[in-house]
Image (cartoon, rainbow, N blue to C red):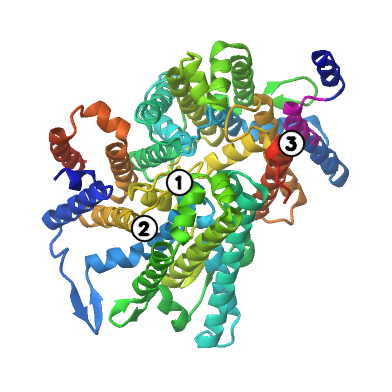
Amino acid sequence: MNRILKHRLFWPVVVLVALLLLNLVFTDGFFRIQMKEGHLYGSLIDIFRFGAPLILVATGMTLVIATSGIDLSVGSVVAIAGALACMQISDLSDQNSVTGVLSAVGIALVLSVVLGLWNGFLVAGIGIQPIIATLILMVAGRGLAQLITDGQITTVQSSSYKLIGGGYWLTLPFGIIIVAVVLALTAFLTRRLALGLLIESVGGNAEASRLAGISARGVLIMVYAFCGLCAGIAGLMISSNVSSADGNNAGLWIELDAILAVVIGGTPLSGGRFSLSGTVLGALIIQTLTTTIYSIGVPPETTLLFKALVVTIVCLIQSPAFRSKVFHRRRRPVAASAAPEEKVRVSA
Amino acid sequence: MTSITGLLDRRRTIPQKYIPVLVTAGLFVAMFVTGGIRYENFATGQIILNVFIDNAFLLVVAVGMTFVILTGGIDLSVGSVVALATMLSASLLKDGWPAYAVMVLVLVIGGVLGLAMGAIIHYFEIQPFIVTLAGMFLARGLCYTISTESIPIDNPTFTDIAQTRVNLGGDLSVSPSAVIAVVVVVIAAYVLHYTRLGRNVYATGGSEQSALLMGLPVARTKIAVYTISGFCSALGGLLFAFYSLSGYGLSAVGMELDAIAAVVIGGTLLTGGSGFLIGTVLGVLVLGLIQTIISFEGTLSSWWTRIFIGMLLFVFILLQRVFSGGSRRRTP
């Protein structure tokens, strides 16, 4: 029992289960998954589908945070990637041509990686604090995205492009498949190969890792480039889902949601260790929360209040200082704390 | 012997800590001169005063942010607290509250919000980034709960303040908001550089561990800076309400970025412990001047503002790196 309580994913799982239970009580047919025209439908599928971009961005962010960095620019990269792809496609004579769409997607992804490399260069090459280094692109990036679309909302009519964010493949939404592939690849690279260990060691102490013979600079640059790539894919998904690119609002605040997902998932902002499964859980919690708020009929204006409440509760529960100050003894009061927490949520 | 040569050195060369501020000041002057050469009617005192008038709220918010950043923290909630302040004043005034009671209440709420965030950050050891992020959601959420529509303000006291111009002699005049902002800057500069609290802020930012071992009240200092930042944001919100004469839940989105950018351009290190309030003032002025120049240019679209601010940030951060790098400096 104690071992389960102390597992770092225990609290995130509790919160997610609590949210799902809330839905079980308040929403009819929340857990029903239907098959329509060969596609899977249902609230649970929707959570995955709409949460896909967030999971992607948060995956990249996890690795960056594991190196004790942070990437504030992902929201801007999301906007830039979507804007560039949509501009390329809208210039095509046949917007449905697969090669045209593929090349547009390719160009957008290459640019995302380049933007990630730029962040990596600032952090590892010049040695600027990550939070400021990525702040530059965060501020300038929105301007760049609007420069690409000329301040307009560019719409495209391309069925091949629509597939990325809104289409289905093998009965599943295509976005979920992309996320699964990226996650599997990341998990393989970081947990089956030495890469994850290198990332964690750079996060623990970059100088010591360098002295130990790890190319800390290379690892850092690669991690930021990967984060840029993830943000780029997420940007394509978001813009393809609505078949348009909005330089101003696409991916707005996604960096904050992504960082939250990572923190809720138990990866410390100080770096040195990371948990991919925790991040996925964190992203799912955020998405489930949003879906829950809509489905139990809370007015959408209070979405942010809810979010603030849950974020505070999750972070407080996870803080060792809070636990030792509030519950002097570990085991018994922990169970008692779950009940008032749920009451607060229901009454709000 | 070494101390004497050190003293002589110091007298001849500018201390390194002033260089970022001087660079920002130089940039401001250069921009002003370039603008004056390029455009007619640019190089007047009123242009600078207009920058103050149009950015009074940002200046006040950035002052609060300077305190937080000097301790090595960050406050992401400022933009939403500004919006909350405008929203609260607008809705309370609509309900017939007296103007001064509203102002006091808004300032108190801002301070209490900051105090709460500071207490959570210090006592529960959660990163400022996350706590103030939650604060940002909370304040923005409260705005939407009050109303999703824009509420106009027609209270006579507020409209009076909005329309009054303080004459400075000649053709120059400023709004009361700009005067309030300057007063805030002067008080903050005094607190930061000449009081015990100010020294504690620098000490905590330099090294929290050492400050603690020296017996400085780290807890009080950290909570105080977030309270100051919350108060300044609420005051900035009031100034914003004077400026726009309405309350709207979506106003001041992204203002935290502008405030952080102003502080960084002003030469304050985000790691804390080093920087000056005058730098923040210059940072706000530079940001304001960029907007003025872009509006004078006429052909440039508004998004160039963001790109320019980004480029400026890059240049300044690079400069800081070169000047403060010391032994750890790495060449690009």
Point out residue B258 in the picture as x, y percentages from the top left corner: 59, 41
Mark 1 neighbour density, 10 Å: few (under 14) some (14–19) many (20 or more)? many
Q: Secondary structure at mark 2?
A: helix
Q: Quadrant of residue B13?
A: top right
Location of mark 2 (residue): A276
Q: Residue furthest top?
A: B195
Is there CB contact under 8 Å for labels 1 and 3? no
Q: What is the span of residues highlighted in magenta in the rendered image?
A: B14-26
Location of mark 3 (residue): B323
Q: Compared with residue A179, is residue B42 higher up or lower down, i.e. above or below?
A: above
Q: Quadrant of residue B185?
A: top right
Point out residue A271 in the picture as x, y percentages from the top left corner: 45, 46
- Horizontal arrangement in the rendering, residue B12 relative to residue B189 (left or right): right
Mark 3 neighbour density, 10 Å: few (under 14) some (14–19) many (20 or more)? some
- Horizontal arrangement in the rendering, residue A25 relative to residue A190 (left or right): left
> Does the magenta segment cover residue A174?
no
Is there CB contact under 8 Å for labels 2 and 1? no
Location of mark 1 (residue): A271
Q: Quadrant of residue B89?
A: top left
What type is the residue that disc 3 sits on? Answer: Phe
Instruction: Report the front residue among A201 and B294.
Output: A201
Q: Compared with residue B229, is residue A319 higher up or lower down, i.e. above or below?
A: below
Q: Are marks 2 and 1 on the same chain?
A: yes
